[in-house]
Image (cartoon, coloured by chain):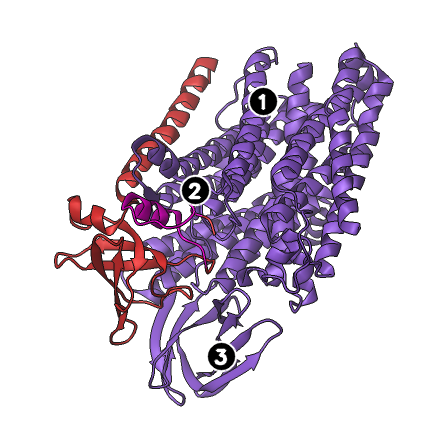
Chain colours: A red, B purple
Amino acid sequence: MTRRSTRLVWIGVIGCVLAAAVGLSMFALRSGIAYAMDPSDLKEKSIGPGQRVRLVGLVKEGTVVRGDGLKVVFEITDSVETISVEFNNILPDLFREKQGIITEGVLRDDGVFAADTVLAKHDENYMPKEVADSLKKRGVWQGDGTAEQ
Amino acid sequence: MIVELGHMALVLALALALLQSVLPFWGAAASDDRLMATGDVGSVGILFFIAVSFFCLMWAYATSDFSVVNVWENSHSKMPFLYKLTGTWGNHEGSMLLWVLILAIFAAAVGVFGGSLPAKLRANVHGVQGLMLMTFLMFILLTSNPFVRQAAVPEGQDLNPILQDIGLAIHPPMLYLGYVGFSITFAFAIAALIEGRLDAAWARWVRPWALGAWLFLTAGIAMGSYWAYYELGWGGWWFWDPVENASFLPWLSGTALLHSALVMEKRDALKIWTVLLAILTFSLSLLGTFLVRSGVLTSVHTFASDPTRGLFVLLILCFFVGGALALFIFRSSSLQAGGMFAPVSREGALVLNNLLLSTAAAVILLGTLYPLVYEALTDQKLSVGAPFFNMTFAPLMIPLVLALPFGPLLAWKRGDILAVGQRLLFALGAAIITTILVLGFTAKGQWLAPLCIGIAVWLMVGSFAELFQRAGFRKVAMPVFFARMRGLPRTVWSTAFAHFGVGVMMLGIVSVTAYETETVASLKPGETVQAGGFEVKHMGYTSRTGPNFDENSARLEIREGGNLVASMEPSKRFYPARQMPTSEAAIETFGFSQLYVALGEGTPEGATTFRIWWKPLVTLIWFGPVLMVLAGALSLTDRRLRVGVPKRARPKADEKAYAA
């Protein structure tokens, strides 16, 4: 092969790999991400059907109801709006009422949020940053201004 | 008293590091032998003082000295002794101290083992290391001092229960040895840029260091993965969590560096790229440190977020990465570029490896930083989850794995792909047979997983082709063949086993992803459920009191075809000091597969929810990296690669050429 054709082969190979990477990333960034929202956001904004959302907020006191098997229903609130969440799995150890949590899933047509992931943070007095920011935005934050313990 | 000694030693280390970041550079610039030699002494001195400081802190933890704020916040007098010791780095301040301790160990290693390095190169390397030590020591002393005292308190607040595990003894030190180990290749790259001198010998010096760091990073990541797997109770082994990505990024570029240094060493080419990779790898390590330590991300690794700390680490990051890249742009044009290669050749294959690995790293970097950038620009939060990474990373790795067995078989300069293909026919055969067998046995209309298993087998078998080829399989008599096998250089063996390890890991990943089964059941004592081909019977509850926790567990009997094969005891613990519950999953290993049982909540009627996974071949996910680590260690024992040994044959000529 001549020097020129060698160079062309390399440019072709590198171009293909990079184009594939860019294409894959663009595609995956559309479907592989979830926007973080609190209940007020979720009610205000219109989101497409099946769009994954990361819903953050506090578990409302006295709303945790266990159903058949693993099914559990509870409400998440940012103290302005409240959304009902259904979850069909074992809850994390640190899940409890009045606790700031993060859930991920999709909003169903009946207005119930079907979560497939529930995250409660690894520390007992830790408030997830997303939740703290949401509470600040809704004007009900009573912490010391930072999201740390 | 001992605590104050530790604090003082840390200040002295900073003073020495200040000198270290000036004198060796000066000596190298002025060609002053005595000034250059200060680097060797200085690096050992800094290590001494940091080690003293570190062990003083450990002493405070061992003796539960709660007058030290850091100990009070992260320890408890009733904690098992091992966790008291490992608690030293189970918090922000202590883990930063471990970080600089390891940085100092590597810097001193250059002084102690770098005898054969040219004096100027060594002095500049010391200078760069000194700068890094200085900035990180300042960071600790100004923002994260672990030696702050308070009025004595009777009892500590306990270590985060998730960290009370043998994993904390191994995972962070291993990971840091890897992360920070790449500081040496970074320092070598900067030193080479300062001098404008870069040759095959440079690559020969750098490669063992890069390999050493890579070994620890591989072990650290694999260990962390297994720890998360058994401790978090979610049954997952990799979550594409930003903090995991932060450790995986330097691993990818470090792996690329190992391979490109090979091209540079053998063919004196890819120089500029290799230097860039050396800079990028450590930059990614620093980025990881920033992401984890600044509190930008929230995860189990983030101990506490303090804005001043984040800003400080960001400044350090910008200084080193920006400075290094600026130097690179200024000086790289003066370095002589290598020539073009034929695409079908050993070096061509290594370039393809680098292309795919660095593209994969770029994609993961994009996914990791995207939420941060997006929030900064639009004030809207989003998360990039596992689907993004699976969709982008896997397609980039498949061609890499397919091409991998070809690489070591191709000749340098010009390879013959058809001849190599013929030698790999048996690997192809093994892959096809495996695919058909798996298709036949599973028969669920799934074709992707059997195909991927076939590809993994292709890699596992193909990895050994070079050994067979070089020993003259079927060309010589069997005894001669075995004698030749034994006589092959260790690096050839290590290449084969490291690549085999990648195949083993892939087999585990595909098998678990496609064929794991999950059973969720609510059982009262005496009740039975079928899960993963086993009969799981609830035998009743047990509670006991640990040193600093209370534990409630369920006893399970596992039967297969009526025979008792195992008893398992998943449990829940409660740590009163932190008011924190944890789950302890029970895991039983059958061959390479595991039965994994996590405990859910109890119901008022006395039943408990169990989550039972059957994870086929799951342990291969960690055996693969273990093989890679062992293979890398084997390669380090090869005489030709031993640290400090390279180029024994003509060091004098080298030194002269260097001085000229």
Instruction: Name the chain under label 3.
Output: B
- In the displayed structure image, the side of residue A33 where residue B290 appears, left or right: right
Q: Which of marks 1 and 2 is in front?
A: 1
Tags 3 and 1 on a common chain: yes
Q: Name the residue under label 2.
A: B397
- Mark 3 belongs to which amino acid? Ser
Q: How far apart are marks 1 and 2 (CA)?
A: 29 Å
Q: Read off the magenta span.
A: A125-147
Q: Which residue is drawn at 64% across and 64% down?
A: B155
Whole-percent x, y for residue B473 in the image: 62, 47
- Mark 2 belongs to which amino acid? Met
Q: Which of B181 and B510 is in front in this view?
A: B181
Tell me which label, 1 or 2, sits earlier in the chain.
Answer: 1
- Indicate whether B70 appears above or below B25: below
Quadrant location, the C terminus of chain B: top right
Q: 10 Å neighbourhood of mark 1: few (<14), some, or many (≥20)?
A: many
Residue B330 visible: yes
Q: What element carries label 1?
A: helix
Q: Mark 3 points at which residue?
A: B553
- Indicate whether B259 appears above or below A82: above
- Mark 1 belongs to which amino acid? Ala
Q: How far apart are marks 2 and 3 (CA)?
A: 42 Å
